[in-house]
């Protein structure tokens, strides 16, 4: 099986990407293929080089030559890097030969950053994120036939203009359009989601809790079952919940000592449709707990071909909430499932925290059917000020379609993709006459299996968000199934999903125009107004040099007024939000001549 890019280490995505610091730069211009000319600080196990322009990067003649199997080069030590870039060209290589890049904090323990296979036979530049704790990089050539030219290496640190970093990463298993990136390119894993999943299984130290609708192990994907068994052998505690009405043939390859639990198959229940894994939820090291979720089931078609996304979040509080949901289905907090107390679907209760501050980003998390997820979808649609995009496998709910229709009628720009699975339902009949060519029906050979909504992705002043997870827009998902949904309030993450949506839409012969009309209002009757901090914890300030009186009203997303405060004007006045629940609110700032509306977020966690 040919593999391309594999990202195996967890990394942080900067909140804002600005200037880059170049920590190391080597263009091999002075390297002549012998020990005396090896660049300072580098170590080469094999001496050889190319001198032609055709076998060199943009820096010009001379490149390093990987000429034998297991030829290895080691970079000088470094610190605080997050990106490595280099140029590679395969010279008469085949589909088996590969170049492996690895990182290490100490030159003893090595983790794979990327495996390039097959190698490009035309010169290609690659860029990969690396772990912030890495101090060494190593490149190794595994040769079948042919050699590799390596050139234009650089090691970078992206300087963020905001403190903190995003602890959320997303992957897509179909091509993305990075030309519409707002600064951070989306990552397309070309038939390597399986390898990335295995990397997260391999990093587990203490526990793995897995709730996946269907797991089918086959030769077309890397051996997930073996990775699970290896984790069990090294002492990781593993629990597995699966959908009782799906084949789940991959479970037969697990060690028989690993406990599993099937969801009910009674008429009062539908399906356990989750696709999540929790890594080391109870670790005392705050950077260990990880949640893997998204729309991807664990089988070859879903991983390699059906249109899907993966969302990975490194946050202890979120992992604890997912664990509470897992335990409710498991019926116990221990290793043995208790079928007498386990609860699935409509029998579950709303017993988890829903609001999180993750790397400075406000994130909402909901489970179906206990948490009323359809109402969250409607609230997200209702928050759109500029544009909304959606990509959904099964879309049957007329209430959601009507909400989108209403937004379109109010002037919001909208585009969507449905799988043909949705054509027979009222949602399509409601939206098709209104959206026309802005609604595409997937026409390829596989499934358009995503379930996401993007709101105001290009306007950072209007609470850009992405809503995604396992929840299709159906009555069953909302009232019977076990599902999970994340709402991530982040311009960067929303734009990454847009890069995926944009390419999907273009591939369906669609056309999208730029709809980035800013709704941020900087003036009130020609006087400056600022609302901060946003998100707010217990207090938010309205700052203005407007000399007259102001009235500030705060409304929740149902339209209910929850707070009113008046001011006689001045530089700044505070509004206490400590008694308000976490969530999104609309703030109306009124004078006798003008009213403006600002969207604010309250997040106490």
Image: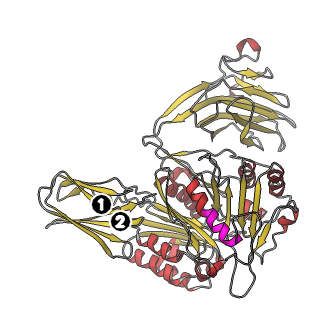
Residue 59 can be seen, yes or no: yes
The verdict on residue 132 being magenta is: no
Please name the residue that numbered disc 1 is placed on: 576
Q: Which residue of the protein is positioned furthest toward the top in this rendering? A: 36
Callout 1: 10 Å neighbours few (<14), some, many (20+)? some
Residue 266, image x, y percentages: 74, 85
Figure check: 448 above or below 459: below
Q: Position of residue 359 (x, y in %)?
A: 50, 50
Is 259 on the left or on the right of 189, as rendered? Answer: right
Please state the horizontal and vertical placement of residue 562, each as a whole percent of the image: 31, 72
Whether residue 270 sits left or right of residue 221 in the image: it is left
Quick one: SS at disc 2?
loop
Q: Which of the pair 192/166 is nearer the observer?
A: 166
- Do the CB atoms of the residues marked 2 and 1 lie less than 8 Å apart? yes
User: Which range of residues does the magenta coloring cover?
Assistant: 322-331
Looking at the picture, the colour scheme in use is secondary structure
The residue indicated by pointer 2 is 579
**Around disc 2, counting alpha carbons within 10 Å, would you say few (fewer than 14), some (14 to 19), or many (20 or more)?**
few
Which secondary structure is most common in the magenta stretch?
helix
Instruction: State the residue in front, 303 or 591.
Output: 591
**Nearer the observer, 399 or 390:** 399
Q: Residue furthest left?
A: 548
Locate residue 500, reporting x and y percent. Answer: 58, 58
Compared with 67, 163 (above or below) is below
Where 450 falls versus 137 (above or below)?
Answer: below
Question: From the viewer's perspective, is residue 260 above or below residue 527?
Answer: below
Tell me the tag on residue 555. Answer: none
Q: Residue at x 82, y 27 (%)?
A: 67
Q: How far apart, in angstroms, are the residues tagged by discs 2 and 1?
A: 8 Å
Q: Secondary structure at mark 1?
A: strand
Would residue 481 appear left or right of 165 to someone viewing this image? Answer: right
Residue 511 is at least partly visible in this image: no
């Amino acid at each position: 099986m040919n593999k391309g890019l594999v990202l195996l280490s967890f990394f942080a995505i900067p909140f804002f990407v600005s200037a880059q610091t170049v920590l190391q730069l080597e263009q091999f211009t002075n390297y002549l293929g012998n020990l005396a000319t090896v660049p300072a600080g580098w170590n080469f196990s094999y001496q050889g080089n190319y001198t032609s322009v055709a076998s060199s990067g943009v820096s010009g003649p001379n490149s390093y030559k990987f000429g034998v199997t297991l030829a290895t080069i080691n970079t000088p030590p470094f610190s605080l890097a997050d990106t490595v870039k280099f140029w590679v060209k395969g010279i008469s290589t085949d589909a088996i030969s590969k170049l492996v890049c690895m990182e290490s904090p100490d030159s003893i323990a090595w983790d794979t950053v990327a495996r390039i296979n097959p190698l490009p036979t035309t010169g290609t530049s690659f860029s990969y994120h690396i772990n912030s704790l890495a101090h060494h990089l190593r490149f190794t050539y595994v040769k079948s036939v042919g050699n590799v030219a390596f050139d234009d290496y650089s090691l970078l640190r992206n300087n963020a203009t905001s403190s903190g970093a995003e602890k959320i990463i997303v992957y897509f298993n179909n091509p993305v359009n990075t030309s519409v990136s707002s600064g951070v390119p989306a990552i397309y894993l070309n038939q390597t989601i399986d390898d990335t999943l295995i990397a997260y299984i391999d990093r587990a130290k203490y526990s793995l809790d897995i709730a996946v609708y269907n797991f089918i192990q086959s030769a077309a994907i890397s051996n997930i079952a073996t990775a699970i068994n290896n984790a069990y052998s090294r002492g990781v505690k593993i629990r597995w919940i699966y959908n009782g009405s799906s084949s789940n043939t991959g479970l037969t390859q697990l060690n028989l000592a690993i406990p599993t639990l099937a969801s009910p198959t009674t008429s009062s229940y539908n399906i356990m449709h989750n696709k999540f894994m929790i890594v080391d939820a109870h670790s005392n090291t705050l950077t260990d707990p990880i949640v893997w979720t998204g729309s991807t089931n664990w089988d070859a078609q879903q991983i390699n071909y059906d249109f899907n996304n993966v969302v990975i979040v490194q946050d202890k509080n979120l992992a604890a909430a997912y664990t509470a949901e897992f335990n409710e289905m498991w019926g116990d907090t221990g290793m043995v499932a208790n079928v007498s107390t386990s609860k699935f679907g409509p029998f579950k209760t709303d017993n988890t925290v829903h609001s999180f501050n993750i790397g400075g980003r406000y994130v909402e998390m909901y489970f179906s059917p206990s948490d009323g997820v359809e109402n969250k979808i409607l609230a997200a649609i209702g928050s759109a000020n500029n544009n909304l995009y959606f990509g959904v496998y099964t879309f049957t709910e007329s209430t959601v379609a009507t909400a989108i229709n209403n937004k379109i009628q109010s002037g919001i720009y909208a585009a969507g993709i449905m799988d043909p699975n949705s054509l027979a339902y009222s949602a399509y009949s409601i939206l098709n006459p209104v959206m026309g060519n802005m609604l595409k029906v997937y026409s390829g050979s596989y499934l358009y299996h995503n379930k996401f909504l993007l709101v105001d992705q290009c306007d950072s002043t209007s609470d850009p968000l992405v809503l995604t997870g396992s929840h299709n827009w159906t009555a069953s998902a909302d009232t019977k199934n076990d599902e999970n949904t994340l709402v991530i309030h982040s311009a960067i993450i929303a734009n990454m999903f847009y890069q995926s949506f944009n390419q999907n839409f273009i591939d369906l012969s669609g056309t999208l125009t730029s709809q980035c009309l800013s709704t941020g209002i900087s003036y009130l009757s020609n006087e400056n107004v600022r609302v901060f901090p946003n998100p707010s914890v217990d207090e938010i300030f309205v700052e203005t040099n407007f000399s007259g009186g102001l009235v500030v009203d705060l409304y929740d997303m149902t339209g209910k007024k929850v707070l009113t405060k008046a001011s006689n004007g001045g530089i700044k006045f505070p509004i206490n939000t400590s008694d308000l629940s976490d969530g999104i609110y609309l703030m109306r700032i009124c004078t006798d001549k003008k009213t403006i509306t600002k969207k604010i977020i309250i997040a106490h966690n």
